[in-house]
Image (cartoon, coloured by chain):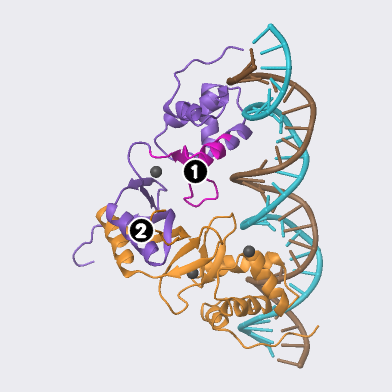
Chain colours: A purple, B orange, C brown, D cyan
DNA sequence: CTTATTAATGAGAAAGATTATCATTTGCAA
DNA sequence: TTGCAAATGATAATCTTTCTCATTAATAAG
């Protein structure tokens, strides 16, 4: 019956600012998200949320990430593997892209203004305004080449 | 009982070249794929295949696109919407990217060597060899700007 | 051409992720 | 404090894709 105590996270404040009802569950999920610097899927978010407050169901995690995404608070990512993954929108760094290590699955973020600009230009020249860029590259760690094989 | 008659498609030949058993169903699906210049999902491929030869099941379409993809004959695409979409690999144009019209869902292909090179460079400078690029952009048709809006 | 071997197929069950349903609970404004 | 709309929990339903297994068909040998 006792409510867990933790400070309102930046995402919880955002939630209020958007006029969304700030329920206990949303406060917990917002806290967990603000506390994460990786790209968890819903199951993983659920695990982390339950540790903060066990009175939470996976259905609510699904509902909340959807709500947060619709309100521009979260970004959904697709790195293959069939489950959506999430991260806070605009953390402090701007838009970024993702390099997936083909062998380990590790996700490495990078920014590149030249790439930003090139994509904008390409799309504009086709007569469109860029709405969303969905880009991830898969790479394999370079093996340093040796002389005489 | 009567077998439909149609010529062996380029993909059917590829299938044989790779040492894959060329069944009637595979011949049909290869024909349908060679005949398509869009990005059908499995349901759509199934519809088209059934018109050529009704003795085919959707399970076989799923199996066949997977097989063809594993053998580099097909490329799987993800444009959102939860279903994989397919197109022939390397048709005649090289690698290309996709612009999705935000309003109509229409898929527009484009090539851009500068983009190819930039992505290669970015990944190399991070110490990786580029394996796969997963890129699609969503855009909205530009509204011609008017004076004193 | 016949036969044998082995892989492919069809039908439907199962799996895995996500969304919907509905009775109950709760945030929040009056 | 009360009332009510909205959110939640539990679980069913949905949707795409894969798996199972009995039956069928492709290829190679004879
Ligand atoms: Mn995970
Ligand atoms: Mn379709
Ligand atoms: Zn990221
Ligand atoms: Zn294409």
Label placed on residue A85: 1
Q: Earlier in the sequence, mark 2 or mark 1?
A: 1
Query: From what the image shows, is residue A99 above or below residue A28?
Result: below
Query: From what the image shows, is residue B82 above or below residue D8?
Result: below
- Where, by quadrant of the figure, is residue B32 drawn? bottom right
Q: Position of residue A44 (x, y in %)?
A: 52, 35
| Viewer-side label of 2, 1 | 2
Label placed on residue B132: none
Asked whether disc 2 touches disc 1, contact meaning CB atoms under 8 Å apart, the reply is no
Magenta residue span: A64-90
Q: Which residue is mark 2?
A: A120
Mark 2 falls on what kind of element? helix
Would residue B107 be visible to someone looking at this image? yes
Q: Quick check: A92 left or right of B4?
A: left
Determine the CA span between mark 2 and mark 1.
25 Å
Residue drawn at the location 50% of the way across and 26% of the way down = A16
The crowding category of the residue bearing disc 2, from other C-alpha atoms within 10 Å (few below 14, some 14 to 19, many at least 20), is some
Q: Chain of mark 1?
A: A
Residue drawn at the location 44% of the way across and 58% of the way down = B137
Residue B54 falls within the magenta-colored stretch: no
Query: From what the image shows, is residue B132 above or below residue B12?
Result: above
Q: Position of residue B106 (x, y in %)?
A: 54, 65
Q: Quick check: D17 left or right of B110?
A: right
Q: Position of residue B128 (x, y in %)?
A: 30, 55
Within 8 Å of ligand 1, the CB of disc 1?
yes
Q: Position of residue B139 (x, y in %)?
A: 46, 58
């Amino acid at each position: 019956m006792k409510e867990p105590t933790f400070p309102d996270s930046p995402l919880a404040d955002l939630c209020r600012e958007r006029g969304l009802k700030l329920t206990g569950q949303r406060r917990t999920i917002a806290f967990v998200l603000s506390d994460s610097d990786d790209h968890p899927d819903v199951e993983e978010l659920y695990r982390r949320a339950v540790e903060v407050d066990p009175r939470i169901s996976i259905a609510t995690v699904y509902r909340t990430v959807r709500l947060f995404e619709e309100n521009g608070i979260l970004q959904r990512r697709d790195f293959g593997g069939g489950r959506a993954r999430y991260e806070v929108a605009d953390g402090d760094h701007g838009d970024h892209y993702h390099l997936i290590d083909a062998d380990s699955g590790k996700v490495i973020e990078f920014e590149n203004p030249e790439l930003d600009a090139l994509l904008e230009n390409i799309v504009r020249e086709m007569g469109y305004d860029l709405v969303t860029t969905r880009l991830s590259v898969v790479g394999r760690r370079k093996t340093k080449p040796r002389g005489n094989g």
